Amino acid sequence: MAENKMAKEIVKGKVAKSKIARAQNANGGLWFEIKRQLVHVLLGLLVLISALKDRESTLWFLLVLILIGVLLSLLQLKFRFALVESLLRKFEREKYRKRFPFKGALFFLTGCLLVLKIFSFDIALASIAILTFSDSVSHVIGLYGKRKNPLNTTKNIEGAFAGFVAGTIAGAFFVPFALALFASLASMFAEALSFKLQEEDVDDNVIIPLVAGTVIFLLQKFF
């Protein structure tokens, strides 16, 4: 009986590792992921710098960028411009290139726009900082993680922990350390879960800043 149970655990572990390995291969490996996340970080820093200079103008700028991005995405789906496709191959996962070009960037900008509009300025900046650094670090470190995340077997604990630490440090530039810590922790839990809307995954570029902002807001309000 004990041997059967042990065998089942070994099989489950192998299946989980296989899922993570398939996810790593599908994502294109380390260099591909580093390039993607560098773009992610640069985009986040640009939004933060712009917002610090002029919040209202940044809101309008983000809205215009999102509308232009949606239009470009639709045009790319219809016409498949070779030059754009070549660029996307360097930075975007294949499944999104085929179904939703520029998906990551569009949802990133949308997440930034939402928190800048909904929350107070310090909360919005902390949320964007957490999104910028926690998500990027968790994806890169997660490529080489070994321990499966019990909340999502396609992810691992090492990536989540690294993202949590990076998000906490980044968020602490704009809100007290304890608030940044809890916001980053909640964001990593939310990022590990699979949220779906009409059979489509809800992008974590929207989930992470909204969860981070909500946690900071509630902690400020009640504590």
Image (cartoon, rainbow, N blue to C red):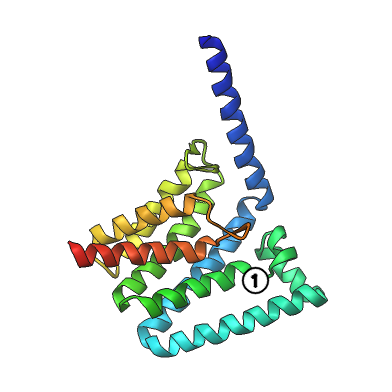
**Closer to us: 198 or 167:** 198
Q: At 68% across and 46% down in the image, what residue appears?
A: 25
Number of disc labels: 1
Compared with residue 33, is residue 153 higher up or lower down, i.e. above or below?
above
Task: Looking at this view, name the residue that lies furthest to the front.
Answer: 198
Look at the image and tell me whether residue 172 can be seen: no
Compared with residue 49, is residue 143 higher up or lower down, i.e. above or below?
above
Crowdedness of circle 1 by 10 Å Cα count: few (<14), some, many (20+)? many
Residue 171: x and y, percent?
A: 33, 64
Residue 221: image quadrant is: bottom left
Looking at the image, residue 118 sits to the left or right of residue 105; the answer is left
Q: Amino acid at mark 1?
A: Phe
Look at the image and tell me whether residue 203 can be seen: yes
Q: At 61% across and 24% down in the image, what residue appears?
A: 11
Residue 5: x and y, percent?
A: 53, 16
* Disc 1 secondary structure class: loop
Q: At 58% across and 73% down in the image, what residue appears?
A: 106
Residue 30: x and y, percent?
A: 61, 51
Looking at the image, residue 124 sits to the left or right of residue 12; the answer is left
Residue 116: x and y, percent?
A: 39, 78
Residue pointed to by mark 1: 102
The quadrant of the image that shows the C terminus is bottom left
**Closer to us: 167 or 70:** 70
**Closer to us: 126 or 194:** 194
Q: At 26% across and 61% down in the image, what residue appears?
A: 179
